[in-house]
Image: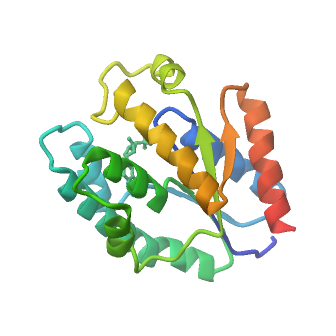
């Protein structure tokens, strides 16, 4: 078993495939004998469960969402992610702070990126952030669950996509387009992770 703590985040707009690719990446790294911990946000703690419920409720103020996502992340980072990193695991998180920066700042023009960074400032930074990019039209067409969550709206997701791409360029994040078949997209993600591990 190889010990090699590394904090990897897969982020991107709804339907970009962060969940599918996080699972595939975990399997790939475990086959290479790494210890891997897979997690996600909203997390599995009580605040995360409440947030999943709020994703179906359009009456929740964007500021409340932002504060709850930050609280969920704070607890998730300190009680789960940091512990696993200290034990030498590779941690893969399906979404992290970049989701708050993008979604909550697009949700309301009262919310600035600086404020999101402030309320999230007690969590550690990922070592590697990979942005999965998808055209929202394709993403929404792929959906099998007909009950849409509040962010699954084409106009909103176009703004989300634009901001992910702008910030990825500013921050030097890797961008992987997910129009291709899953195997090819996953191979691109694996190559980025292997290069980072080397
Ligand atoms: P998902 O698990 O299907 O990706 O859904 C999570 C939804 O929550 C997605 O629409 C993005 C949104 N979200 C935020 O708005 N802010 C956040 O900080 C996080 C982690 C997720």
Residue 195 placed where, x, y %? 85, 60
Instruction: Answer left or right for 174 relative to 139.
Output: right
Residue at the location (77% across, 65% down)?
A: 34
Quadrant showing the N terminus = bottom right
Residue at the location (74% across, 36% down)?
A: 185
Instruction: Name the quadrant containing residue 150.
Output: top left
Asked whether 24 or 116 is in front, the reply is 116
Residue 58 placed where, x, y %? 17, 37
What is the residue that sits farthest to the right in this orientation?
198
Residue at the location (79% across, 54% down)?
A: 192
Quadrant showing the C terminus = bottom right
Q: Is residue 13 visible?
A: no
Badge count: 0
Residue at the location (39% across, 70% down)?
A: 117
Residue 55 placed where, x, y %? 27, 41
Image vertical order of residue 142 relative to residue 64, above or below: above
Instruction: Name the quadrant containing residue 71.
Output: bottom left
Residue 112 placed where, x, y %? 32, 61
């Amino acid at each position: 078993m190889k010990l090699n703590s590394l904090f990897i985040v897969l982020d991107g707009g709804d339907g970009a495939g962060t969940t599918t690719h996080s699972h595939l990446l975990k399997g790939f790294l475990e086959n290479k004998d790494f210890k891997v911990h897979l997690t996600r946000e909203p997390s599995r703690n009580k605040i995360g469960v409440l947030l999943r419920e709020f994703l179906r409720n359009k009456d929740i103020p964007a500021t409340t969402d932002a504060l709850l996502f930050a609280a969920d992340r704070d607890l998730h980072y300190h009680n789960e992610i940091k512990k696993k990193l200290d034990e030498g695991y590779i941690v893969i998180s399906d979404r992290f702070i970049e989701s708050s920066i993008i979604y909550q700042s697009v949700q309301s023009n009262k919310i600035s990126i600086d404020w999101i960074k402030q309320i999230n400032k007690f969590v550690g930074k990922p070592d590697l952030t990979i942005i999965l990019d998808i055209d929202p039209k394709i993403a929404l067409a792929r959906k099998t669950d007909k009950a849409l969550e509040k962010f699954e709206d084409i106009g909103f997701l176009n703004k989300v996509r634009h901001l992910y791409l702008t910030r990825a360029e500013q921050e030097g994040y890797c961008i992987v387009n997910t129009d291709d078949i899953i195997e090819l997209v996953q191979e691109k993600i694996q190559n980025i992770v292997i290069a980072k591990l080397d």
